[in-house]
Image (cartoon, rainbow, N blue to C red):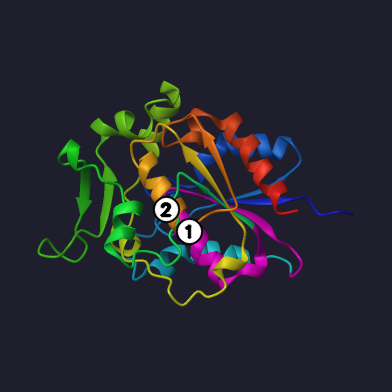
Amino acid sequence: MERRLHFVLVHGVGNGAWCWYKVRSLLENSGYKVTCVDLKSAGIDPSSPDRLSSFDDYNSPLMDALSALPDDERVVLVGHSAGGLSVTRASGVLPGKIKVAVYVAATMLRNGFCTEEDRKAGLPDLSEFGDAYDLGFGLGSDHPPTSAVLKKSLQRKLAYHMTPPEDAVLASMLLKPGPIQVLSTARFVEDKEVDAVPRVYIKTAHDRIIKPEQQEAMMSTWKPKEVFVVESDHSPFLSAPLVLFGMLVKAAALAE
């Protein structure tokens, strides 16, 4: 019997597997297999974001899930926002497990954050909003912050301004601090196989977190096979789930 196409969905900072609930339902109702991963300290994972030792520590649930797949199974790996770093890392280490890599409003940097240009393109710049984050200082107040979550007063305005109100409320109840220290220092210069995996980028046209011009900068530096554009905020899995679902299915077909 033919194996069902398998989508593995990876959340961004502060989110968890829960954020994909609409897209997961659409995919599963269409006959696809879906796995939604909670990275370390995210979703229902009990780890502290202030105590993670490295990006690979944070990303280990995804790598474990991919490593456990049958030898002949290849997945459609989807990452949102900072989840793009997880997709890139997996593509470099386990390229044989990935049919196509899909970046949704995501950080798409071949080698991670190695240069100032990488940081300018791939890190949110919310300086115009002043003190936009609640920060955690796991190494002490005299060290850089180890975790951050967008202030509740700004979540709707920045991340969910095109999202239905009830989903924006749900997200505000479930968002957790993300491990910004290990994310912002992620580097993958040793991952030589990363270009073996075809990439698709889904650009969010009205994004206030990873702004459209940042997404364009990353795509111009590391050109994907295909680009789709969704008229959404930073959270199309909530604000435009049906459109995103269609784009994910199209992206999967490009690797045939």
**SS for dot 2:** helix
Question: Does 159 appear above or below 89?
Answer: above
* Mark seen at residue 222: 1
The reply to whether residue 163 is visible in this rendering is yes
Q: Is residue 85 magenta?
A: yes
Is 95 or 4 nearer to us in this picture? Answer: 95
**SS for dot 1:** loop
Residue 155 position in % (x across, y down): 31, 34
Would you call the spot at circle 2 few (<14 residues within 10 Å), some (14-19), or many (20 or more)?
A: many
Q: Are marks 1 and 2 in contact (CB under 8 Å)?
A: yes
Q: Residue at x 34, y 64 (%)?
A: 113
Q: Which residue is most to the right? A: 1
Is 96 or 139 nearer to us in this picture? Answer: 96
Question: Does 84 appear above or below 250?
Answer: below
Q: What kind of residue is marked 2?
A: Met
In the rendered view, does 149 fall on the left or right side of 101?
A: left
Q: Which residue is most to the bottom? A: 190
Q: Residue at x 81, y 54 (%)?
A: 3
Would you call the spot at circle 1 few (<14 residues within 10 Å), some (14-19), or many (20 or more)?
A: some
The part of the image, by quadrant, that contains residue 196 is bottom right
Stretch in magenta: 71-99
* Mark seen at residue 218: 2
Q: Residue at x 62, y 58 (%)?
A: 198
Q: What kind of residue is marked 1?
A: Trp
Q: Is residue 230 magenta?
A: no
